[in-house]
Image (cartoon, rainbow, N blue to C red):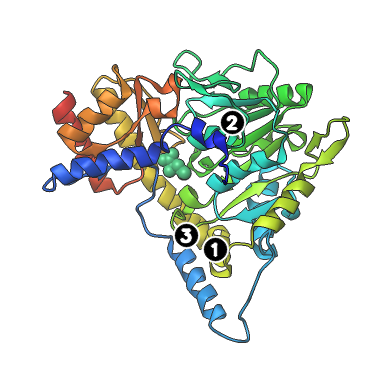
Amino acid sequence: MIRINENYLKLKASYLFSDIARRVAVFQEANADKKLIRLGIGDVTEPLPQAVVDAFHQGVDEMADRATFRGYGPEQGYAFLRDIIAQEDYQARGAQIAADEIFISDGAKCDTGNIQELFAPGVRVAVPDPVYPVYVDTNVMAGRTGENIDGRYQGLVYLEGTKANGFIPDLPKEPVDLIYLCYPNNPTGATITKAQLKAWVDYARKHRALILYDAAYEAFIRDPELPRSIYEIEGAREVAIEFKSMSKTAGFTGTRLAFTVVPKSCMAYDEQGNAHSLHAMWNRRHTTKFNGVSYPVQKAASAVYSPQGKAQTKALVDYYLHNASIIRQEMTALGFDCVGGENSPYVWIDAQRDSWEFFDLLLDKAAVVCTPGAGFGACGQGFIRISAFNNLASVQEAMERLRLVLQ
Ligand code: MLT
């Protein structure tokens, strides 16, 4: 008799976005005539920037020619891409990250989910609340938690984000080893200042903890004072791994390319207290379990850093930021307190009632899909998230419909 990994039985029945998709499907079946506007899952709608498309085509053409055809590439990614990322995303911003500390992959979801494999079953894990569910569920699957009681897994330390602290949790009051942070934040859209982030880096240094920093939404930062990478903070090279993605930056949700930065100075310890390089461990894992992102996709991603690519990518992000500002403005005018929507594609709205009740109201009365805050954790109860990822006309129509329902 083959036994299952019983940790899976602790998981809540489904992944949040699958749950929402099911409810939406039921609504659509009953209301086939209604045009749905999806502002729920953060999935891009606009086409890839032209410079990216051109490079993508070129990559495919190279694969069609015996002289330029490529088989397996380096698992960690081609040097042409790692080099340009190190220069443009890090060194140009004063962060000392080398090209060989960058691991190209097919998604930040996979990487943030897989990274926990490097750590002992017993490490004490701190997650924000509200939280991107992947950080929690992957630790549940790995057996680092007890049962889910009243919406919280036993054994996890929840770092509470509330209106009172501006959704920047206080430092942990109990000892923790692994700390997940995400800024600009999913789901709240909150941003963190350099001084606030420094407090976390200092905490990690003092307590020999490690920060897993999800910067998937970094491209939405327009305020020059906000950190675009944790490595802009002194000392972070010793205590932080950073995850970034082309998904929201350049419209790659369907194209797939992300990267994880593991500095060579990042260490974790064995039972005897000996230090081990996380860079070497992640490299071992990556080369064992991953065979690299396809050449045309890496070629396409490198075009994000060309002069045209930079301008076009910025325009794409600005487009969604404009949508976000409309959502924030409209919801504020309707009397709802909002966070995010500036330097972030997500607007986090105090629903003034149960999250799922508000979700159902918007779906049933306006055919608008949002994400109920409660799906992101106990602290998300009473909030909803509206995503700016849609075309402008749809966002405007959604806001008109919400005005009719909520005014
Ligand atoms: C979200 O809506 O939170 C995102 O689409 C999640 C993701 O990028 O996986």
The answer to whether any part of residue 20 appears in the image is yes
Tell me the distance, in whole angstroms, between the alpha carbons under discs 3 and 2. Answer: 25 Å
Name the amino acid type tagged 2.
Leu
Residue at 36% x, 45% y: name it. 389
Circle 1 crowding by C-alpha within 10 Å: few under 14, some 14–19, many from 20:
many
The answer to whether any part of residue 167 appears in the image is no
The picture places residue 247, in percent across and down from the top left corner, at 48, 51
Q: Relative to 362, is 219 above or below? A: below
- Assign the C terminus to one quadrant of the image: top left
Horizontal arrangement in the rendering, residue 281 relative to residue 310 (left or right) = right
Query: Circle 2 sits in a helix, a strand or a loop, which is it?
Result: strand
Q: Where is mark 2, residue-wise?
A: 181
Residue at 57% x, 66% y: name it. 294
CB atoms of marks 2 and 1 within 8 Å: no
Q: Relative to 62, is 349 above or below? A: above
Residue at 18% x, 29% y: name it. 403
Name the amino acid type tagged 1.
Ala
Q: Relative to 152, is 68 above or below? A: below
Q: Where is mark 3, residue-wise?
A: 255
Outermost residue, front side: 1
